Image (tube, grey):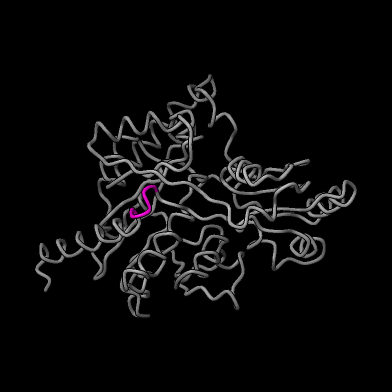
Amino acid sequence: MVSEAPPFWWTRSDWRAWMLFPASWIYGAVARTRMENAARIEVDAPVICIGNFTVGGAGKTPTALALATAAKKAGHKPGFLSRGYRGNLRTTTIVDSAQHNARDVGDEPLLLAEKAMTVVTPDRLEGAKRLLEQGADFIIMDDGFQSAAICFDFALLVVDATRGIGNGHVIPGGPVRAPMLDQMRNASALLVIGEGTAADRVIRSAGRAAKPVYAGRLRVLKPRSFKGKRVLAFAAIGNPEKFFDSLRSAGAHIEVERGYGDHHEFTEDEAADLLDLAAKNKLEIITTSKDMARLKDGRGRIAELAVKSRVLQVQLDFDPAGLAPEFIDRTVQAFKKRRLGSGGS
């Protein structure tokens, strides 16, 4: 999957997107065939899949974390199932933050593991079985919607209100992972995060497909600690602008901002540049939880950058607040129906 997304993906369709249309058509046809012929192997637990229509930056991770909290409150023992993007491990592994780092398992699984048991695996069926063996009774899939290797009982597709689906073209001409009609057909509901009109075309598409649309917003935790601060802000996530906007909403004055590609691995020179620039201008350094997960096990100037950086913590709030328990309950009810249909007791 592409991490260094071309900027033209997120603007109005231009000659570059249309020049790549034949390649996008082929990619989309393969993706459609893959979705139509997905294994969808059943596992003996409710499974909710948190996916997005496009490459990165929609808000899957905070959504997954919020649903894990709701699942715990409902009396479940949730477990996260992740591919561990950019991790080096190629076997099914239970994430241990005391033993693993971002290079081993990926940055997002480290964040998920702070909330609930997390497994990274190239084989989602094997990963689901491992979670169940370890006592999980509710599985939250972080991504995996397009591959559908295992059967999910509820598929919540996340879209950012300020970014939408970009130019609407399928990879490589745009950020869309598979033809929208095929994705919408397999979705259970749409979650629009933030405020804006960029997701309106997706909302209309969901309406035509009779899929319910819900809302959520990222809330900065402890915003007063950032108010009035002069800062250097840097982020290597799918949508750095979302981070910058959240920081400004907390009252911080961003004097310098640096955005990098999603999951970017910082070099010594890049870390030194950020540190020196902040020191020269007497700025506080602020970054994201995902970036800190990659930095904290670094050495040299990278380790120094981790020590001198503060993390902007955010939390997803559903609107209305009762949505998270509703999603958990709908997943459980769909699982019970699935078991009855397959002859389970």
Q: Identify the main secondary structure in magenta.
A: loop
- Between 343 and 255, which is closer to the camera in this rendering? 255
Residue 107 covered by magenta stretch: no
Percent x, y of residue 133: 34, 80
Image point 38% across, 45% down: which residue? 191
Q: Would you place residue 50 above or below residue 131 in this image?
A: above
**Quarter of the image containing the C terminus?**
bottom left
Q: Which residues are magenta?
A: 319-323
Residue 322 covered by magenta stretch: yes
Q: Quadrant of residue 87?
A: bottom right
Asked whether, in this view, residue 339 is left or right of residue 2, the answer is left
- Between 25 and 225, which is closer to the camera in this rendering? 225
Asked whether, in this view, residue 86 is left or right of residue 228, the answer is left
Percent x, y of residue 108: 53, 60
Image point 37% across, 36% down: which residue? 28
Outermost residue toward the top in this view: 15
